[in-house]
Image: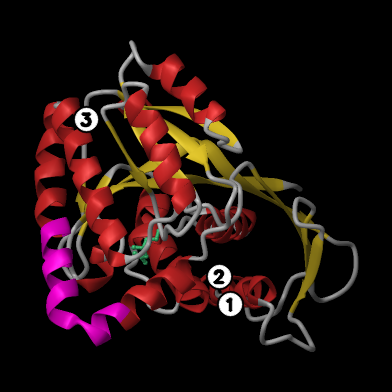
Amino acid sequence: MVTSSSACGKAILLGEHAVVYGQPALAVPLPDLSAYAKVEPLPTGSGIVIEASDLGRSVTYPALNLDNQDLFARGLQTTIGNALAALQLDEVPPLSIKLHSQLPPARGLGSGTAVTIAIIRALARFTDVLLAPEVISELAYRTEILYHGHPSGIDNTVIAYERPIYYQRGKMLSLLEHIPAFTLLIADSGIASQTRGAVEQVRRAWQAQPTRCEALFERIGRLTAAGRVALEAGDWPELGALMNADQCLLAELGVSSPEIERLNAAALQAGALGAKLSGGGQGGCIIALVDAATTETTAQALRTANARQVWKVDVHDADWD
Ligand code: MEV
């Protein structure tokens, strides 16, 4: 019997980086961009063979010799080990797991987290166990620590719950409902965004200049709180303005890049209501908030500004009702 599961990508509308320091952040799931895991029993053996054909990688669990630098393989070992324990499987079943992702890796869209959660869901479905979103999120968080060092937990939360969230560490999670529909353009700068490196750089800046950085985090937190109100009210000009303000603060934190600035400027000149990096930054993707009148011109402007790829994402309640 073959079982398949998926997990979506994510975009952070407001609040990345500051969320690591206890400020709130707003994130939405991207169901049109997902990762998939297909689990199939193997006739013999006692290990799990994971194939990621998109990356040309094949990894076995449990691995005998693990290269410490190979985060992909270490992430898979952590994910599968924790999932098997949560599913109370004492013996490793002989399985094949085939991975496929529509999400470009290292672009701030949650590709690694989506793969992790797709695997956890596929193993749970294979063993006929229902895992609650908070359990899936917690399991994925353990892999996030390995990938990102000091993750806030926002990526595993929004992807495990597959709902727009207002997230603040240590506070009760707010799942946002009845949000009016809106459209994002996501444009890939073509430059890899290493969340771990960006988070570490911000940490070094904070250690060197705590007062300056904490003031920036607090300003980001305030505009994120205002962004939640704008999002729930469908006040898109206000949300766009807050995204632009957030982008300026993220640039002050040192996580923007010339490519991101170029794509943001192209989107805004073409009429987007707001544009900013999303995720770790220093590369990766930008998100632009657009209305019906400016979607096509903005998408064209982003392509002309050398975006590697542009996705139009309609965010609406029907996706998660
Ligand atoms: C990564 O998607 C978002 C960051 O804020 C890191 C984190 O929250 O763990 C940059």
The answer to whether residue 321 of the structure is visible from this angle is no
Q: Residue at x 45, y 51 (%)?
A: 258
* Alpha carbon distance from label 2 to label 1: 8 Å
Residue tagged 1: 78
Residue occupying the point 79% across, 88% down? 64
Q: Nearer the viewer, residue 257 or 20?
A: 257
Read off the magenta span.
205-220
Graded by Cα atoms within 10 Å as few (under 14), some (14 to 19) or many (20 or more), the crowding at tag 2 reads many
Badge 3: residue crowd in 10 Å (few <14, some 14–19, many ≥20): some
Instruction: Tell which circle, 1 or 3, labels the residue nearer the N-terminal end.
Output: 1
Q: Nearer the viewer, residue 49 or 305?
A: 305
Magenta region, mostly helix, strand or loop? helix
Residue 207 within the magenta-colored segment of the rendering: yes
Q: Position of residue 120 (x, y in %)?
A: 56, 61
Image quadrant assignment for residue 306: top right
Q: What amino acid is found at the position of numbered circle 3 in the picture?
A: Ile
Instruction: Identify the image quadrant of the C terminus.
Output: top left
- Residue 246, numbered label: none
Q: Which residue is mark 2?
A: 83
Q: Position of residue 5 (x, y in %)?
A: 60, 47
Q: In the image, is residue 184 above or below residue 281?
A: above
Instruction: Give the foreground label among 1 and 3.
Output: 3
Q: Nearer the viewer, mark 2 or mark 3?
A: 3
Q: Earlier in the sequence, mark 2 or mark 1?
A: 1
Relative placement, left or right, of 199 versus 71 is left
Numbered disc 1: secondary structure: helix
- Pointer 3: what residue? 179
* Amino acid residing under circle 1: Thr
Locate residue 94 relative to residue 37 in the image: left or right: right
* Residue 188 picture location, percent across and down: 54, 42
Ligand 1 within 8 Å of disc 1? The answer is no
State the separation of the CA atoms marked 2 and 3: 33 Å
